[in-house]
Every structure is written in structure tokens, then in C-alpha cells.
Image (tube, grey):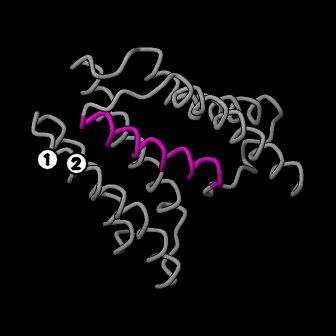
Amino acid sequence: MLTASNSLSFIRAPLAFLFLQENPTLRLIAIILAMVTDSFDGYLARKSQSVTKFGAILDPTMDKFFVYFAMTVLFLEQKIAPWEMAAMLSRDFFVCLYGLFMILAGRWKTVVFRAIRWGKITTALQFIVLIGLVVDITFPWYVFSSFMLMGWLAFLELFQARTSTA
């Protein structure tokens, strides 16, 4: 279903392709617009009462597409080290680990797709780090290490939400 909020989510895909241009201004505009659309798509869906299961999956998928695409370009340009990129993506590893746990426990069909606090915080920090990388800021190791901590916290949040509703 194509709603206004889903359209805002979809915009992040073409914005990612602006990273193919080596123009820092275009890249900053892309990140800022991705952040704005990410902030407003869910709000718009709730306000217009057009929340859908499709939208609940589309929003984080477009976030991940944008971040992965931008990070891949920056990695190929050697602006981010392999371990830093892996750290920034560790939340997704933990979410996959949770999904694997749910499959093995035979509870996959009961999983509710929804935003989680640590997922939102991680995405916001990913956008901030992307801005810094675009303008050639070097981040200390603990900024990237914090992504691993947030991944673990996301896993615990998912697990806790699952056990409190089971």
C-alpha cells in the first residue's frame, strides 16, 4: 500500500545514490533528508491512521539500505575501516541473532515487527557518524564500540519484549 508515510520511507533509496557523487554537500543533503524522512514517516503514519505492517517493515529496510549503501561507498573510498563498518552494523547482527533464536524456538510466527528504542538510537548515531565521515571527522574507537553495546541492548530489548508478552 502506497501511503504518504510509505512514500517518505521510499525516498531514502534514491537519496542513497547521491553517495555515488563525491560531492560532500550532496552527501550531507542526502543524510539530512534521510534523517528528516525517517523522523516523519512514522509520525505521519500514526497521525493519518495509516499504519501498516508493510510500512513497519519498509521504514527500517529503507534506513538500512541508505546506511549500508553510504557506508559501502565510504568504505570503498577508505574513509571507514572494516572493523568500524562491522561495528556500525553490529546491531543488525544482534537482530538477526534474535530472529535465529525465534526460529529455533519455534516462535517466528509470533514476532511483531515494531520499532525498538535501541534500534532508533543506533540509526540516529549511524546518521551522525555518516555526517562526520563525509566531512572527514575521525571518530575515536569507543564511538564505534558503542554500536556493539547498542546491538547487545537491542537484542536484550527484543528478548525482554518477547518474554513479557509471551
What residue is drawn where x is 23% and y is 51%? 30
> What is the x, y in percent for residue 85?
43, 23
> What is the x, y in percent for residue 3?
36, 73
In the displayed orientation, state which residue is furthest to the bottom: 48
Q: Is residue 97 above or below residue 110?
A: above
Q: Is residue 134 magenta?
A: yes
Q: Secondary structure at mark 1?
A: helix
Q: Is residue 4 above or below residue 135?
A: below
Q: Is residue 15 magenta?
A: no
Report the predominant secondary structure element of the magenta stretch: helix
The image quadrant of residue 7 is: bottom left
Give the residue type at disc 2: Leu
Q: Secondary structure at mark 2?
A: helix
Q: Marks 2 and 1, how far apart in space?
A: 5 Å
Q: Few, some or many C-alpha atoms within 10 Å of disc 1 (few <14, some 14-19, many ≥20)?
A: few
Give the residue type at disc 1: Thr
Whether residue 153 sits left or right of residue 87 in the image: it is right
What residue is drawn where x is 29% and y is 35%? 70
> Which residue has dot 2 on it?
28
Range of magenta residues: 116-135
Disc 2 and disc 1 in contact, CB within 8 angstroms:
yes
> Which residue has dot 1 on it?
25
What residue is drawn where x is 31% and y is 57%? 10
Q: Few, some or many C-alpha atoms within 10 Å of disc 2 (few <14, some 14-19, many ≥20)?
A: some
Task: Pick the quarter of the image with the N terminus.
Answer: bottom left
> What is the x, y in percent for residue 57?
50, 54
Whether residue 21 sits left or right of residue 61 in the image: it is left
